[in-house]
Every structure is written in structure tokens, then in C-alpha cells.
Image: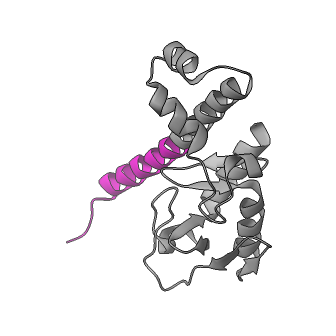
Amino acid sequence: MTLDETLYNEARRARDRLEEVQIEAERARSWYHESVRRLYRAGGSLREIAQALQISHQRVHQIIDDAACSFCDARRAEVEKLIAGPGVFICDRCLLLALGVVANEQDASNDRTTIRAVAADTSKKCSFCRKKRWRVGWMAEHGETRICRRCLSVCTEIVGSL
């Protein structure tokens, strides 16, 4: 059976649009969480922020306190920037380290962690966008947390805009 070229192209365009929207949603989530943290650092109480945003104060607490880099375990207060993904985080230091891993295609370390290059013959997925290694090119990992080249690029944009 051969695929209908028109339908195939439509499916590819739909997939590409979905990927763009998912990345935009992650940017928006990160921006929202950072905005909540700035409200808190500016003196807002958990309850005041929760009431203003119409969310529970427990959710505000989670946004403010639960953040730690998934690559080096540094808490929010220990790093300059912390980017949120879907249940994962990467700090500015690990972001730079992972960029080096992907660019040089070899493992790299700093005083807090070692980030490894993900082998090409694996079906592992990026923890941020959930795409498999074969689909996104080079990825960097620490333990079970992985980040692809495209998500590294998005995180770099986010850090630059905060």
C-alpha cells in the first residue's frame, strides 16, 4: 500500500504544528511560573497570590518551592535561572553544560553533576518534549532526565527573555 501524498503532507504539517504549539505551551508555563515566583519575591503571600490568580494557595506553594533542577538537584534559590518543563526542570548551569554535550557529542561535568550524551541507537525520549532520540537528534541526559537540542534551544530563549 502506498500513502496518499496529499494526506501524508497534511499529517506532517499537523505534526509540525502540534510540536510548535507544545513548545509554546511550555514557554507560557515557564513564564507563568516565573511570574508567580516574582510576585512572591516581591512580598506577596501565598494566599494573596492564590486569591488574585484564582488558584489554591497549595498550588502557589508548589510553584514556588517544588522547583529543583532535574540534572543537578539545585534548588531554585541556588541558581540564577530555573526553566520548568512537564515535571522536569533545568537550571542555567546545567543548560550550558547540556548545550556543550549536544554541540560536542560527548559527556561533560561540573562541580555538581555529569551530563552524558545519549547514544544514537536508543529509543529514549526527551523529558521536555517527549520526542524519541531518533526524531530529535542529539540529546543530553542525567539519570532518567533527558533534553534534546530543540528543547535546549527553547530553554536558551526563555533564559534570555526572563
> Where does the magenta region start and end?
1-23
Name the quadrant of the C terminus: top right
Residue 66 image point, x, y percent: 55, 46
Instruction: Please determine whether, in this image, residue 103 is positioned above or below residue 32.
Output: below
Q: Is residue 3 magenta?
A: yes
Name of the residue lying farthest toward the left: 1
Residue 40 image point, x, y percent: 67, 26
The residue at the point 50 percent across, 61 percent down is 127
Tell me the chief SS of the magenta region: helix
Instruction: Please determine whether, in this image, residue 98 is positioned above or below residue 90.
Output: below
Residue 107 image point, x, y percent: 71, 82
Choose top left, top right, bottom left or bottom right for residue 26. top right
Instruction: Please determine whether, in this image, residue 149 is positioned above or below residue 159.
Output: below
The residue at the point 45 percent across, 22 percent down is 55
Choose top left, top right, bottom left or bottom right for residue 95. bottom right
Q: Is residue 124 magenta?
A: no
Residue 139 image point, x, y percent: 60, 71
Instruction: Please determine whether, in this image, residue 24 is positioned above or below residue 146.
Output: above
Front-lying residue, 80 or 1: 80
The residue at the point 43 percent across, 46 percent down is 18
Is 153 on the left-hand or right-hand side of 51?
A: right
